[in-house]
Image (cartoon, rainbow, N blue to C red):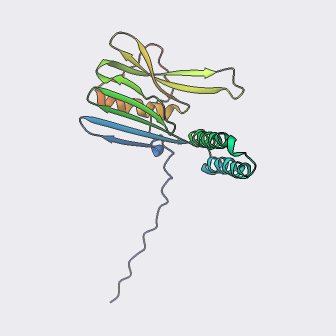
């Protein structure tokens, strides 16, 4: 006798909601926390095209630039490279938060610039403050992550236009530093503060 098994009907699963963690990589141990947030602000093709146009213009100019003015040609190459870095920064922005022992480092790139350095032992609390730029026509909003230090000073750690991203990073840092998630005066508290 041959038995036929019933085929179970597959129930379509709901698509997962977009979560800020899609652009955030977290690596955590007892002694070290690393958070890398990558944000694409445009098309990589734009940065490469901008650099290519600069190189093409320099190659065309090489034939008619006198040898005594060769420094101007080399200066053009340097300027093209700087333009490429600026275009790359506008295309792909990367922020890395690193906490190791009492060292708290906030480094933004890919442009080379001074990183922010904090003493993790001096951070008593973290909170988010909302800033709206009313002068901009598109009403730009930024959510600032601030640290309250033991001496009472409030220092800016980082800012982004997406509240859920800033909130998620705030919670990860608080968890690593054993800081309770309690509201403070002046903190931005939306109606729905849940991160699913």
Residue found farthest to the right: 64
Residue 117 picture quarter: top left
Left-right relation of 134 to 118: right
Q: Position of residue 43 (x, y in %)?
A: 62, 48
Which of the pair 35/52 is nearer the observer? 52
Residue found farthest to the front: 68
Residue found farthest to the bottom: 1
Q: Quadrant of the C terminus?
A: top left
Residue at image position (49%, 37%) is 109
Which of the pair 148/107 is nearer the observer? 107
Q: Position of residue 182 (x, y in %)?
A: 37, 20
Left-right relation of 178 to 192: left
Q: Compared to 160, does 152 lie above or below? A: above
Which of the pair 158/196 is nearer the observer? 158
Q: Position of residue 17 (x, y in %)?
A: 50, 46
Residue at image position (73%, 52%) is 63
Q: Quadrant of the N terminus?
A: bottom left
Residue found farthest to the left: 30
Residue at image position (49%, 59%) is 12
Left-right relation of 189 to 138: left
Q: Position of residue 137 (x, y in %)?
A: 72, 26
Left-right relation of 91 to 159: right
Number of callouts in the render? Answer: 0
């Amino acid at each position: 006798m041959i038995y036929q098994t019933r085929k179970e009907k597959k129930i379509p699963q709901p698509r997962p909601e977009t979560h800020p963690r899609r652009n955030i990589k977290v690596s955590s141990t007892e002694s070290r926390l690393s958070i890398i947030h990558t944000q694409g602000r445009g098309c990589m093709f734009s940065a490469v095209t901008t650099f290519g146009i600069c190189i093409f213009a320099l190659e065309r100019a090489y034939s008619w630039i006198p040898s005594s003015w060769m420094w101007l040609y080399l200066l053009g190459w340097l300027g093209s490279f700087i333009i490429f870095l600026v275009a790359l920064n506008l295309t792909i922005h990367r922020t890395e938060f690193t906490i190791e022992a009492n060292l708290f480092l906030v480094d933004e790139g890919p442009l080379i610039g001074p990183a922010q350095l904090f003493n993790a032992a001096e951070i008593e609390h973290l909170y988010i403050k909302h800033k709206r730029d009313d002068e901009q026509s598109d009403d730009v909003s930024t959510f600032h992550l601030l640290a309250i230090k033991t001496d009472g000073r409030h220092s800016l750690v980082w800012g982004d236009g997406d509240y859920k991203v800033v909130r998620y990073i705030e919670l990860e840092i608080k968890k690593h530093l054993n800081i309770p998630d309690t509201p403070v005066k002046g903190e931005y508290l939306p109606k729905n503060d849940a991160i699913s």
